[in-house]
Amino acid sequence: MSTVVRFAPSPTGYIHLGNARPALMNWMFALKTGGQFILRFDDTDLERSKKEYADAIEKDLAWLGIKPHRLERQSERKAAHDAARDKLIADGRLYPCYETADELDRRRKRARAMGRPPIYDRAALKLTDEEKAAFEAEGRKPHWRFKLEGKEVHFDDVVRGDQVVNTDTMSDPVLIRADGSYLYTLPSVVDDIDMGVTHVIRGEDHVTNTGAQIELFEALGATPPTFGHHNLLTDATGEGFSKRKGSLSITNLREEGYEAMAVALIAILTGTSQPVAPHNSLEELAQTFDISMVSRSAARFDPAELSSFNARMVHGMSYENVKDRLAEMGVNDGEQLWNAVHENLEKVQDIRDWQKLVAGPVNPVVAKEDKDFIATAAERLPAEPWDENTWSAWTNDLKAETGRKGKQLFMPLRLALTGQSHGPELKTLLPLLGRKACLDRLS
């Protein structure tokens, strides 16, 4: 049977690097197994879900290289969720509870004070019809809990191996709020069943939830999918990313000029046994990547690593890779410029700075002790045409004439021609500048 995976974000904000990790892990799995990838919006919270966020998520995933085979919206599947609700109620697995948030909080505190685990005591199961009617008369509306079997749930995690979750140590989870809206669990399980999801690959913070979810699959008469829980991507301090904090949103990373493949590879490979190294495409990476390569230890991400890795990828790009993008930026006939400066770029867009430097004007930097040397350099500037050999011919002539060598020879020339102490090799930059511009700057 073909594998089917899903990524189910809530369209209540922009996705960040931490969200991109499970999306990309699932995409890798689909590519590796020749399976299907479903983008399923968890948009049952109608108040907070926004179309602008859903559109942004689709755009961000496409930019990263993810091409969903199907797009689903949970808000359009309420009839299926309601049918599952009714079955669970009829089977006695979903029961109404009337406690307020304050009452539940007091019970938890009392349980802790008495040295007991703060799990729900199932008091609602003991309510009589009269007591329920009295609560209804007060204006209370019930929330609904799923009655767990209280057993050891075993599952083989494709990342973590054999796992056991004891649902006897858990509170019966709330599946339906007092206003009748669904929390994440029931729609998710119902949709996984109906859409034929074979593998649920997600963050390790969901491991404990898996026990209750497997019981819910079984209560609905379905075989649970295979689960895999990868380590979470955190910042350098070990703190998780957050939509509310605006942590490294994919939209911002794209707008800041990072390469999509650099962002994707950092999100996938950090915290795995595979080194973070350039790849031409996600399809290429999928040939060597396996979900079992994910480490059990933390996947810590340092933004400096992304900048460094992005620069590494840019340095390896040919002009053919970027010529269309350069044309969009107004860098026309940019092959010579790209070949001269790309190994000095952190981002492709940085080439505009070098375009300005070549076109001029610049502010030449000439130290007092170098004035005579720079005057001599101007006098002995070779005639055109120029090529990559012009720089060595010129500097060898100056070395013989002035006795200067090494940094004492090269640095004053660089400062006078570019106004900077660093940059591309001048043997490639000199022909771009041309003789007239060089004479102007040496003057």
Image: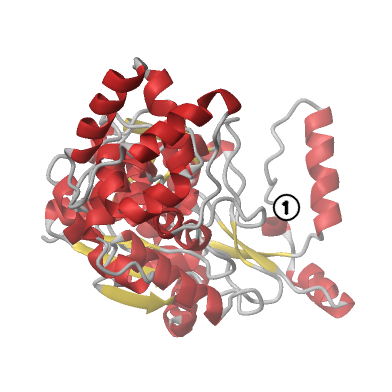
Left or right: residue 225 versus residue 182 is: left
The amino acid on which the numbered mark 1 sits, given as a three-letter code, is Ala
Q: Residue at x 79, y 60 (%)?
A: 99
Residue 9 or 306: which is nearer the viewer?
A: 306
Figure check: 282 above or below 266: below
Q: Position of residue 232 (x, y in %)?
A: 47, 39
Tell me the SS state at disc 1: helix
The residue to which callout 1 is attached is 123
Figure check: 433 above or below 97: above
Left or right: residue 69 versus residue 138 is: left
Q: Position of residue 301 (x, y in %)?
A: 48, 35
Residue 438 or 313: which is nearer the viewer?
A: 438
Q: Within 10 Å of the Cα at label 1, are there few (<14), some (14-19), or many (20+) other Cα atoms?
A: few
Q: Position of residue 299 (x, y in %)?
A: 44, 33
Residue 87 or 429: which is nearer the viewer?
A: 429
Left or right: residue 403 versus residue 244 is: left
Figure check: 21 above or below 230: below
Q: Residue 150, can we see it?
A: no
Q: Residue at x 66, y 78 (%)?
A: 47
Q: Residue at x 53, y 60 (%)?
A: 252
Q: Residue 25, can we see it?
A: yes
